[in-house]
């Protein structure tokens, strides 16, 4: 699935700009700086497909990537970054909600949680939004290489407790390091199964 043919397709700031594709789509959501773009790069075996930055809150659009015509990735801008004006944030949330709800080919949302920090208050409304949009989501813990084992385990059990409060069934939590490659094969396998379904 993941080859050098993977390419950036387009960025959509409005719903009318969503790509007219039929392929299975998967989106990546999570707080600013959690490692969404890095994970996409690691999955595709590319260094700079999705732009990564240490300056949070850069991308205010949905970025679409074409993975050999059978799979599309959507990189969402990070949330929880305080600099954007409240009105803008609300407008953007509406776009994301409509996208999650009205995109039949969108098979799963990955919600990324930083392995050093665990679940944060800004993650909870996002999980609720996914529930309301009837969007099936799966938690991916990132930056496992930077977290201490004990902290990581605590964060994972807290995420499990949080998920238990949400009505839908949730697939297993995946633990990854885009830097070291840990867990990347498992994420690829999960995506592979979604494409075959
Ligand atoms: P926004 O687009 O701003 O929301 O950020 P993002 O979620 O796309 O994060 P991005 O992939 O740009 O990564 C943010 C920073 O974390 C970068 O400096 C990455 O190099 C670093 N990073 C991402 N994943 C890992 C990881 O697995 N391990 C380590 N050590 N650093 C990582
Ligand atoms: Mg990014």
Image (cartoon, rainbow, N blue to C red):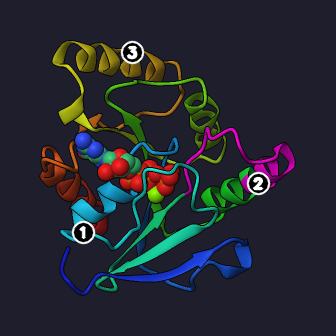
As drawn, is 141 to the left or to the right of 74? left
Q: Is mark 2 within 8 Å of ligand 1?
A: no
Looking at the picture, how far across and down is residue 147, in whole percent? 24, 26
Alpha carbon distance from label 2 to label 3: 28 Å
Above or below, comparing residue 63 to residue 190 in the picture = below
Which numbered marker is on residue 94? 2
Left or right of 112: which side holds 42? Answer: left
Q: Residue furthest front?
A: 55
Identify the secondary structure beneath mark 1. Answer: loop
Task: Judge whether residue 86 is colored magenta.
Answer: yes
Whether residue 58 is in magenta: the answer is no
Q: CA distance from mark 1 to mark 3?
A: 32 Å
The residue closer to the viewer here, 105 or 95, is 95
x and y percent of residue 90 in the render? 80, 48
Label drawn at residue 47: 1
Q: Residue at x 39, y 60 (%)?
A: 52
Identify whether 49 is placed above or below 160: below
The residue to which callout 3 is attached is 158
Secondary structure category for the residue under label 3: helix
Q: Picture quarter containing residue 174? A: top left
Q: Residue at x 18, y 80 (%)?
A: 3
Please give the range of residues in magenta: 77-92
- The tag earlier along the polypeptide, 1 or 2, is 1
Q: Residue furthest right?
A: 87
Residue 39, given in percent of the width and then of the height, sits at 30, 55
| Residue at 66%, 41% in the rendered image | 132
- Quarter placement of the N terminus: bottom left
Cβ atoms at labels 1 and 2 below 8 Å apart: no
Please tell me how many numbered marks the rendered image carries.
3
């Amino acid at each position: 699935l993941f080859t050098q043919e993977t390419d950036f397709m387009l960025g959509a700031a409005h719903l009318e700009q969503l790509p007219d594709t039929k392929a299975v789509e998967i989106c990546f959501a999570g707080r600013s700086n959690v490692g969404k773009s890095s994970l996409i790069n690691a999955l595709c075996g590319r260094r700079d497909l999705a732009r990564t930055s240490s300056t949070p809150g850069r991308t205010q659009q949905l970025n679409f990537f074409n993975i050999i015509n059978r799979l599309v990735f959507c990189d969402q801008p990070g949330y929880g970054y305080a600099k954007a004006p409240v009105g803008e944030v609300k407008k953007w949330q509406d776009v994301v909600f409509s996208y999650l709800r009205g995109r039949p080919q969108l098979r799963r949302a990955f919600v990324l949680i930083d392995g050093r920090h665990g679940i944060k208050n800004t993650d909870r409304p996002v999980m609720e939004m996914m529930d309301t949009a009837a969007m099936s989501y799966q938690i991916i813990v990132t930056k496992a290489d930077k977290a201490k084992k004990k902290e990581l385990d605590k964060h994972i059990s807290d995420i499990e407790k949080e998920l238990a409060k949400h009505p839908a069934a949730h697939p297993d939590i995946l633990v990854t390091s885009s830097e070291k490659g840990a867990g990347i094969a498992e994420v690829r396998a999960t995506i592979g199964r979604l494409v075959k379904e």
